[in-house]
Image (cartoon, rainbow, N blue to C red):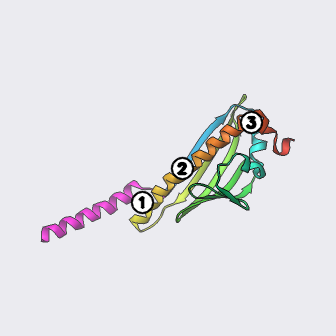
Amino acid sequence: MKYIKLFLIIALSLFVFLVYLVIPNKIVVSNNNFVHQPGNIVSNAFMSIQYWDKWMPHDSIDDHTFILKQGKLEVNESFLSAIKCFYTINEMSGPVTYSAIDAGGDSTMLRYEATINNKFISPLQRINNYLDSKKMKGQLDITLEAAKKFYSKKENNKIGPTQ
């Protein structure tokens, strides 16, 4: 019986140690896609968030918040080259930045990056946040692919300030 308790204590300690060793304190998810359209045209259209409902795959919209299949994306600010959002899924949330960058020639890079603070004492919370960050990445990848598909068509780049 004494050896079983010792084994359980060692196994539990090893599990907790591995969780803190493998799962980082700051989880960064990002991706980019290239659109074969001139950068300035796509950037102007992409930065016009009032037209995001034309391409953003969403279940519903509540003011400036897109309710997605998994989680919600709240648009906070739009700048000349970036759009700041806040993504929430289950109990995890974090800032997301979308950007459209001229990639030279007739190409534009659409990109997102999200950072999740994962400095929790509870190993279970760290594991949950890590799993939720994978769901978050999957959902944001879907939005980026939808933006690429939408902005790859010339007629969709005429919306916004370029009209």
Determine if the magenta segment contains residue 30. no
Q: Earlier in the sequence, mark 2 or mark 3?
A: 3
Q: Which amino acid does label 2 sit on?
A: Lys
Can you give x and y, in whole percent of width and height, for residue 18 in the image?
34, 57
Q: Can residue 109 be seen in this view?
A: no
Which quadrant of the view contains residue 158? top right
- Residue beneath label 2, please? 137
Q: Nearer the viewer, residue 125 or 81?
A: 125
Task: Measure the C-alpha gap from mark 2 to mark 3.
Answer: 25 Å
| Residue at image location 23% in from the left, 64% down from the top | 10
Q: Circle 3 — which element?
A: helix
Q: Which of marks 3 and 1 is nearer the N terminus?
A: 3
Q: What residue type is labelled 3?
A: Gly
Is residue 156 left or right of 67 when viewed as pictured?
right
Magenta residues: mostly which secondary structure? helix
Task: Measure the C-alpha gap from mark 2 to mark 1.
Answer: 15 Å
- Residue beneath label 3, please? 39
Can you give x and y, in whole percent of width and height, for residue 2 in the image?
13, 71
Q: Give the range drawn in magenta.
A: 1-25
Q: Can residue 94 be seen in this view?
A: yes
Task: Measure the C-alpha gap from mark 3 to mark 1.
Answer: 39 Å
Q: Earlier in the sequence, mark 2 or mark 1?
A: 1
- Residue beneath label 1, please? 127
Tell me the quadrant of the picture where the N terminus can be found: bottom left
Can you give x and y, in whole percent of width and height, for residue 117 in the image?
52, 61
> What label does residue 20 carry, if any?
none
Is residue 31 left or right of 14 when viewed as pictured?
right
Closer to the camera: disc 2 or disc 3? Answer: 2
Q: What residue type is labelled 1?
A: Ile
